[in-house]
Image (spheres, rainbow, N blue to C red):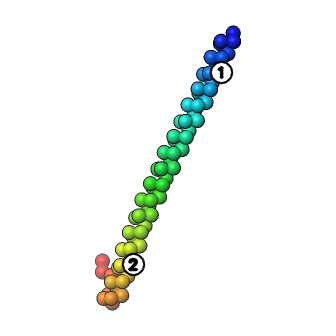
Amino acid sequence: MALFFSSLIAIYIGALIIAAISISVITVFCICAVLTAAGSAAFVWAIWQIVKKGANLLKGFSGVSYSKFP
């Protein structure tokens, strides 16, 4: 009987360890995915801002409004 309960305790502890490792790995992957998505969005935003500032600078130099053209 003691052997039976000892094996149940071992299985329970093993299941807890596997669950903790799984949750930790999934958490790390989710954090990496969020950081990658945020970095990509920030990169696109930065490029957009650079292009917009460049267009405004060119518009100021040439005196032409590009919104007049279709």
Marks 1 and 2 sit apart, C-alpha to C-alpha, by 65 Å
- Could you tell me which quadrant the N terminus lies in? top right
Question: Which comes sooner in the sequence, label 1 or label 2?
Answer: 1
> Is residue 53 positioned above or below 35 on the image?
below
Judging from the image, what secondary structure is the residue with disc 2 in? helix
Amino acid bearing label 1: Ile
Tally of marks: 2
Name the foreground residue: 64 vs 11. Answer: 11
Q: Position of residue 44 (x, y in %)?
A: 40, 64
- The residue lying toward the viewer, choosing from 51 and 31, is 31
Picture coordinates of residue 38, whole percent (x, y): 47, 58
Q: Residue at x 42, y 69 (%)?
A: 46
Question: Is residue 68 visible from the viewing direction of this image?
Answer: no
Q: Quadrant of residue 69?
A: bottom left
From the viewer's perspective, tell me whether residue 16 is left or right of residue 1: left
Q: Residue at x 52, y 41 (%)?
A: 26
Query: What is the crowding at mark 2: few (fewer than 14 residues within 10 Å), some, or many (at least 20)?
Result: few
- Residue for badge 1: 9
Quadrant of image for the C terminus? bottom left
The residue that mark 2 highlights is: 53
- Which amino acid type corresponds to the residue marked 2 in the rendered image? Lys
Please identify the residue farthest to the right as the structure is shown.
2
Indicate the secondary structure of the residue bearing disc 1: helix
Whether label 1 touches label 2, CB < 8 Å: no
- x then y, percent, for residue 20: 58, 35
Residue drawn at the location 63% of the way across and 24% of the way down:
12
Q: Which residue is depicted at the point 38% across and 82% down? A: 56
Residue 19 appears left or right of 46: right
Q: Is residue 12 visible?
A: yes
